[in-house]
Image: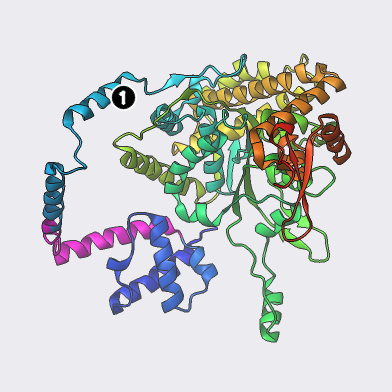
Amino acid sequence: MPNQRSTDTVRRNLAKGFESGTFDISKVRLHSDSAFRTDVEEWMSENTQVSPQTVRGAYWYDLFREWQTKAEEVQEATGEAGQSASAPVQTSFEEAIHREMEDEGPGHVDAAEVDEVQEELDDLPYSTPVPGPQGRPWLGKKAWHGIAGEILEYVSPDVEADPAGILATMLSSFSCLIGFDAYAHGPIKQHVNVWHILMGDTGEGRKGTAADRAMEVMRRVEMGFMKKNTTSSLSSGEGLVIAVRDGMDEDEIARREENGHKVDYGVDDKRLLVMSTEFAMVMQKTHGGTLGPILRDLWDGKSLNIQSSDAEVATDPHVTVMGHVTPQEFADRQRPSEMAGGTWNRFMPIFVHMPHEIPWPEDPEDWDEKLTEFADRLREAAHSAGSGTKSVKFSKEAQLYYRKHVYPEYSRSSGDSVVMKQFTQRRLPHLVRVAGTYALMNGRTEVSLGDLEAAKAVVDYAIESARFVLATHAPGGGMAAAASAEDKEARDKAILMQALQDAGESGLNRTHISQKVLKYRRKTDEVKAFINDLELVVVKQNSGGRPIEMVFHPDFAPKDGE
């Protein structure tokens, strides 16, 4: 984590380099703290003997602001030389554009034709509402709160992503950015660390679009973090521990350095943002392995310890996990063993579906300016929240609202199914975490009434998302549960036939059918039986190694000799 000693060391070396002329501020990028940090880290490694661990531990935002001011002073002292040199270039460019517009050659387009096309375009609606599946939940307007609400209001009209998905991604990524030391003290004490799973059908859910829109903002907050502290890999519990592991103790380091042996300094920055777009595979791996227990410990804020031949320890790790699944994938993974362990109710399940169709989306004219403004405000809030231990208290108004309205509602879950109770009984920890995130995003160390109401709107939406998905897809919860084994078999056969029709003459291999089409619901012998029952065509194709069996719909099977 950043510390003052590292900051002073970097500051001192930069000052010496500036005085001697080896550190040229004009060659350092000052448009963002992440670019500044990259350039300075490179200069430090080439011109000083300071260890990389010390350099990484500096308060880079403070140094960035200091050298921005220094650069302005240098510019004022040296004048605005060179500014006028750009004028002839601009004039020449404008003249070239003017000549091109006057061109009457073969490529010329009649202005009247352009006007007619523009009129047709103007008559078309920019966006068309999409109601989505019947009974789907909708995010309450109270969740559109503070800077997160401002961002949603600005970006949502021009993207087909569900605002709930954009908001969840912002809350989770910001909660990771601020680090391990932020706590929220409400009716219970919780780390400010928000996990979620976006649940949406492929294509219509726009899960990736929602995440991308949110990350467009968050990348501008701290690009260095997004490059170095994010991963899409979540293959094992051991891998997670290694990603945030402690280094060897000082005596072991000294002994190994003396003997010329390899030294593991560990990971200084214990923040890690996991963004898994294939989370169904992750959910499958948690059964019987170490990943489930490790995930639960990480959400609980515990240090990690893997007892193996290469024992690894991770002290105070701050890992935030965001996953993407289809509703059916989510429902299929709600097994009693995992529900008893309480892995998946540590994630807020967020249903997403495109709210409108936008055939030709366009960003507003002030897009870069507004996103930079949002990023600057979030960066300042994150810097404040991440500097030392932060304890976020609840205001008196928030306490009153909780006691009068939230507690009576949250204390009741008797009418829920066994599976749904796992989610409703985890509402309070989620509420405290999300409320703390809202407060810190807005530069406060106290949860206001608005923060709490916004958090409740998010948690309510998560609970309604779980109810909706489990009622329409899950065994034991609704329509899917009522289906007989024969109905499920007929459904999967229909899905397979449709997938093969879509594949056409390309066909599909068995692995793709098992993993991507049938989503691991069928064993190998069941897939083979489906192929026989449906009279599908199997063709062996050479691939340079062992032949691959490709499966085709009868209408698209290659003819003999092809």
Assign the magenta stretch its main secondary structure.
helix
For residue 475, which quarter of the picture? top right
Of residues 38 and 297, the one drawn nearer to the viewer in this rendering: 38
At x 55%, y 58%, the residue is 1
Question: Which residues fall within the magenta stretch?
Answer: 59-88
Estimate how packed mark 1 is, as few (under 14), some (14 to 19) or many (20 or more) residues with alpha carbons within 10 Å. few
Verify whether residue 119 appears in magenta: no
Up-down: is 3 above or below 442? below
At x 36%, y 71%, the residue is 14
Find residue 470 and report its horizontal and vertical position in percent. 73, 22
For residue 34, side relative to residue 174 (left or right): left
- Element class at badge 1: helix
Up-down: is 384 above or below 228? above
Residue holding disc 1: 121
Numbered disc total:
1
Up-down: is 83 above or below 319? below
For residue 544, side relative to residue 194 (left or right): right
Q: Is there any visible trace of residue 87 in the rendered image?
A: yes
Find residue 534 and report its horizontal and vertical position in percent. 81, 29
Q: Is there any visible trace of residue 186 in the rendered image?
A: no
Find residue 263 and report its horizontal and vertical position in percent. 67, 75
